[in-house]
Image (spheres, rainbow, N blue to C red):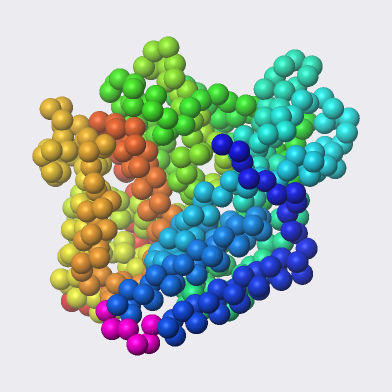
Amino acid sequence: MTRKTVKRVKTGSVERRFSMAKAGFMAGAKYATASAGTFFTSKDKREERRKEILSARAQELVEELGKLKGSVVKIGQMMALFGEHFLPEEVTAALHTLENQTTALEWPAIEKHLQRQLGEVKLAELDVDSTPLGAASLAQVHKAIRKSDGKELVLKIQYPGVADAIDSDMRALVRLLKMSRLVPITEQFNMWLDEVKEMLRREVDYDLEAHTTRHFRQTLADDPRFVVPEIVPEYSSHNIMCMTFEHGIGVNDPAVLELSQTRRNFIGRAIMELCCREVFEWNKMQTDPNFGNYLLRIGDAPEKDQIVLLDFGAIRDFDNDVLGPGREMIRASFYHDTERLIRALSALDFLARGTPRRILDDFAAMCFEAIEVLQDPEKFPPPADLLNDKLEYRWGESNLPARIMNKAGRNALSVHFDVPPKEFIFLFRKLLGAYTFLHVIDAEVRGNTILEPFIHMQEEDDLHQVDQKTITPAD
């Protein structure tokens, strides 16, 4: 398939603001005009038609944003990932299509950018493939060969000017959303915009990403199950990150499901243990649950298979005062301890005051079910068809996320629970990402044997944090 390309990225603030203002005005005008046309339809059909119109206008707006690339597109992607709590579902669905943007910057512009960043002498030492391996909103990736020794490298090339455009893009995007009339501008929405801005600044900080990559490479050096690329500083700059090219296949590659059950279990256990180490041991989390951040390298024996970890730009450090209550939620759910769970929820500022006891019990039951993949199946068995004869959880057969979302949609939780804090959503996404990984590779792993070695780590400190923050809910 031929990849779409653009000759340049619009980086001038006036040019970008004009493009966004035009898109917002057109979307808002079309939405208002089309909505007026539903006035004489019946009430039930009017609501259905309103959703169709909102969806169509949101999709048109997203298509215009996608042409701009840079932080505007990344903001939209982040809003799609974390915006379920304050955005209309039609807008969220449209924003999710930004994740499939494949437009790349044409080679002449990339080559000129490389010459400015690395200098012609350094660039001449490399044979850079003009066709990108991948293109995203903030950067694109090109394979390169070092001429002196044939070493395979990868250049992650940040688009010119995107880092400098973040603040102006954020201001322009807010004006666009107001003009489009598609998104309610609430306090929660503004709080998330601030968080998105901070996430963006981290993702365009290649010095920080290079440091984090080195940290994980050193931390995992003695674990042969994982491969982390090596940073190559002589071909790196503030806007270019060079690293070793690592071979592997995608998690969704059909070849993965052709592996034996033993091999897939080995891979699944490794990724789940990595998740537990991030949450319980390191206080560092990969907050982007994207399969593109992983490759699988198939070895010549089951214990030789490896997971290649890519893209450390979304790694976040968390203090115990914010991650501790989240770990306590996991422990409380693991032990089916309702009172402990309520204290953790209060410490996370998740509970509205005066929440009825019945609602708390319903939510606790949902949390207990949500962690069934990590429970001891002899103490708290999941549905019988999800266990094999070794009592290992059959991740590929599970529909756990759908069950949980269905229950959440049928109760009164939204009335009594505040918009979740960002730390909770990061933790939720981390666990969901690990679950989805094991689901896709159809692993069969007994989850409690993975979690139990980690569950008491930092427990005393976490209990202290919760005790300091707890608000007792009214019965």
Point 44% across, 54% down: residue: 426
Observer able to see residue 290 = yes
396 vs 342: above or below: above
Point out the residue furthest to the top here. 300
Residue 205 x/y as whole percent: 68, 49
Residue 28 x/y as whole percent: 54, 78
Residue 301 x/y as whole percent: 39, 13
Is residue 206 a member of the stretch shown in magenta?
no
Quadrant of the image containing the N terminus: top right
Residue 44 x/y as whole percent: 27, 79
Point 44% across, 16% down: residue: 299
Quick one: 127 or 246, which is closer to the camera? 127
Quick one: 60 or 341, which is closer to the camera? 60
Q: Looking at the image, how many numbered discs can be counted on the residues?
A: 0
322 vs 290: above or below: below
Is residue 42 a member of the stretch shown in magenta?
yes
Q: Please identify the dominant SS of the magenta region.
A: loop
Q: Quadrant of residue 359?
A: bottom left
Locate residue 282 relative to residue 116 in the image: left or right. Answer: left
Point 78% across, 31% down: residue: 234
Q: Which residues are magenta?
A: 38-44
Locate residue 200 relative to residue 335 in the image: left or right. Answer: right
Point 24% across, 46% down: residue: 399
Quadrant of the image containing the C terminus: bottom left
Q: Quadrant of residue 157?
A: top right
Quick one: 3 or 214, which is closer to the camera? 3
Observer able to see residue 178 = no
